[in-house]
């Protein structure tokens, strides 16, 4: 069982929090979603997506890559169906990032631009690839990095739960070495806090630093940078492998 902690905050600008996260350590499920849509549709989309994945994995008992991907597909179907049945939810969608314990590995499914970062002996690196205009259109067109950082389409998603058309799910596997940390974050965190600052916060008090304190520091760093969006941080650590 992994040691885990999560913290979410509306940020400094928005009144409501459309991020939603859920930790189910007894099932080995750790999930985060960043909703979008008018009124409270984003909040409903993110909660529905995460709860659907947890419910499906619990009921199926299938703790492998196929079970995870099937649960994400079903979450997408349920969000689409909810929007079809209620006109006030039309156009709602959400990112979805799920880590699932599968034996000695963590299987990770990702839709959208919520991210997983791994901090291990090699340093901090991004596990996931954002499904955004920058990655799927801008870079293939050959635009330079400075232009991409300023481009008005830079935040546009190319894939989301609840979007029309075939769903594309990115899939990864991660092994947590002793004292390694896995961070799941919404773009309200990694979109405003530099990777160097994220790494510094994660390393603070290592190897036994409190996950609660690290999450709190990450949230505060995003708020200090203006907190323009909802902020969520989920941290996982293999306590069984931590040195004594």
Image (cartoon, grey):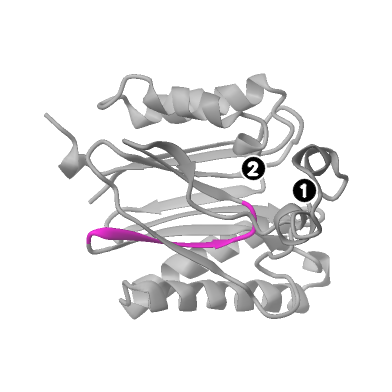
Q: Which residue shows up at 35% across the image and 79% down it?
A: 60
Quadrant occupied by the C terminus: top left
Q: Which residue is mark 2?
A: 187
Closest to the observer, 89 or 165: 165
Closest to the observer, 135 or 179: 135
Q: Which residue is mark 1?
A: 155
Residues shaded magenta: 104-113
Residue 177: % across, % down: 25, 44
Q: Is residue 117 toward the left or the right of residue 13 in the image? A: left
Q: Is residue 82 above or below residue 192?
A: below
Q: Distance from label 2 to label 1 (Cα)?
A: 10 Å
SS for callout 2: helix
**Residue most extreme to the left:** 244
SS for callout 1: loop
Q: Earlier in the sequence, mark 2 or mark 1?
A: 1
Q: Which residue shows up at 63% across the image and 58% down it?
A: 95
Q: Residues within 10 Å of mark 2 (few under 14, many from 20)?
A: many
Helix, strand or loop for the magenta stretch, by majority: strand
Q: Is residue 66 above or below residue 48?
A: below
**Residue most extreme to the right:** 152
Residue 9: % across, % down: 59, 34
Where residue 179 sits, quadrant-wise, is: top left
Q: Are marks 2 and 1 in contact (CB under 8 Å)?
A: yes
Closest to the observer, 81 or 239: 239
Q: Is residue 52 toward the left or the right of residue 38 in the image? A: left
Q: Is residue 173 toward the left or the right of residue 13 in the image? A: left
The mark tally for this picture is 2
Residue 175 colored magenta? no
Residue 156: % across, % down: 79, 54
Q: Which residue shows up at 39% across the image and 29% down it?
A: 212
Closest to the observer, 85 or 109: 109
């Amino acid at each position: 069982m992994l040691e885990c902690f999560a913290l979410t905050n509306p940020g400094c600008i928005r009144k409501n929090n459309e991020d939603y996260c859920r930790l189910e350590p007894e099932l080995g499920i750790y999930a985060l979603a960043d909703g979008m849509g008018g009124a409270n549709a984003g909040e409903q989309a993110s909660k529905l997506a995460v709860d659907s994945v947890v419910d499906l994995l619990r009921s199926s008992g299938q703790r492998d890559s196929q079970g995870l991907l099937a649960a994400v597909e079903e979450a997408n179907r349920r969000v689409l169906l909810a929007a079809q049945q209620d006109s006030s939810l039309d156009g709602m969608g959400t990112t979805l990032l799920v880590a699932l314990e599968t034996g000695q590995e963590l299987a990770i499914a990702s839709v959208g631009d919520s991210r997983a970062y791994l901090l291990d002996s090699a340093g901090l690196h991004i596990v996931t690839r954002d499904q955004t205009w920058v990655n799927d259109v801008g870079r293939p067109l050959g635009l330079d990095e400075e232009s991409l950082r300023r481009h008005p389409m830079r935040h546009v998603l190319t894939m989301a739960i609840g979007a029309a058309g075939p769903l594309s799910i990115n899939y990864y596997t991660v092994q947590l070495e002793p004292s390694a940390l896995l961070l799941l974050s919404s773009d309200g965190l990694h979109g405003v806090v530099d990777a160097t600052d994220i790494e510094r916060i994660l390393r603070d008090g290592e190897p036994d630093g409190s996950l609660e304190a690290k999450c709190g520091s990450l949230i505060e760093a995003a708020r200090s940078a203006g907190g323009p969006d909802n902020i969520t941080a989920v941290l996982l650590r293999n306590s069984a492998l931590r040195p004594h």
